[in-house]
Amino acid sequence: MKFIAEIDIMPHKELLDPQGKAVVNNMEHFDLTGITDVRIGRHVTMTLEADSEADARRKVDTACQKLLANQIVETFHYDLAQAH
Amino acid sequence: MKFGVIVFPGSNCDDDMVHVLGDVMGQEVSKIWHKEKDLHGFGDGDCVVLPGGFSYGDYVRAGAIAQFSPIMQAVKAFAAAGGYVFGVCNGFQILCESHLLPGVLLHNANQQFICKNVWLRPGTNRSPITSDLDLNQALKIPIAHAEGRYFADRATLDALEQNDQVLFRYCTPEGAISPEANPNGAERNIAGICNAQRNVFGMMPHPERASEAVLGNSDGRGIFESLVSSVLV
């Protein structure tokens, strides 16, 4: 079975995100006001073959835990759907 | 003792490290390609060095992909057996991503790549790379990184300090450890640490770029002299 995982990896909420801060501080340069916070993470689209949804989740979890996210500083969340 | 310098795709300080260890310090040194699966002939008293650079283009996170290079399984086994492992800059990032050292290196607080001389205060003599250093003498060593902001949770930071594992802190030229002397926002001004067993050590600054009078700065040489003398004992 073929699955597609849409994965979001974000810095922990309590952590300074200097990239997001730089972006929010520069919005005023094109006259956009009212943006109070920006936090920037990564989005990963992963296509995978798995025997079942549980098997697919195990694979996505392993990929996130071992490589895609560093859980000291990042959290991950994903939506999984069967591809047709 | 002998030294092995691991070369990852994107390493760019490997030749500098080989030069300092071999030509300046007069030690036996060889390069090891990251696709090797074992550390041929490396054993007790030998040292593996992970040099600076941009392994795998810093994709995902600096050091994140290099931790799965074939040689790193051998480096982990070597470290577990008590072998010396020294990471500089990207090498430090790889050691953290590999969980051979606690914590992680984040983007600098000012979101810029910083390349300049900074001052470091050794935090302890209880490590192979700080054993001969004067704890009251600040060293001028260059940094060159975008992801050098050392981070760990409070419990980990407290444990590092209680166990005397903080090897270097960013300081003023006079040796004061202050927020103004912190170039990248590192927690508690931390620039280098070792593991609890004290055989794995990493630092963001580049002592191999500051070990010869001809370069106008030899403050880094004491770090290599410490390493050679403590390992030869």
Image (cartoon, grey):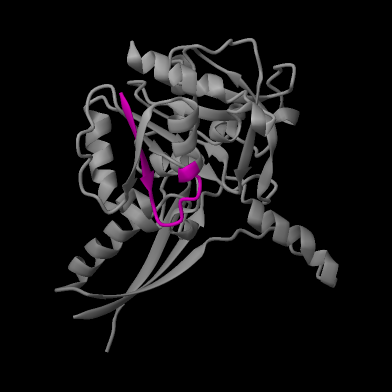
Q: Position of residue A73 (x, y in %)?
A: 48, 46
Is B7 magenta? The answer is yes
Q: Position of residue A77 (x, y in %)?
A: 40, 62
Task: Give whichever of A12, B165 is nearer the camera.
Answer: B165
Where is A5 relative to B27, above or below?
below
Image quarter for residue A80? Answer: bottom left
- Quarter holding the N terminus of chain B is top left
Q: Residue at x 46, y 56 (%)?
A: B10
Where is B132 relative to B139, above or below?
above
- Magenta extent: B1-15
Residue A36 in view here: no
Q: Residue at x 75, y 30 (%)?
A: B180
Task: Give whichever of B102, B34 is nearer the camera.
Answer: B34
Where is A3 relative to B110, above or below?
below
Q: Position of residue A17 (x, y in %)?
A: 61, 51
Is B182 magenta? The answer is no
Given the current orientation, which residue lies at the most extreme left position? A51
Task: Give whichever of B219, B81 is nearer the camera.
Answer: B219
- Quarter holding the C terminus of chain B is top left
Q: Residue at x 74, y 16 (%)?
A: B174
Total marks drawn?
0
Residue A22 shown left or right of residue B43 in the figure: right
Where is A15 relative to B57, above or below?
above
Q: Position of residue B19 (x, y in %)?
A: 48, 37
Q: Residue at x 66, y 33 (%)?
A: B215
Residue B43 in view here: yes
Given the current orientation, which residue lies at the most extreme bottom position? A84
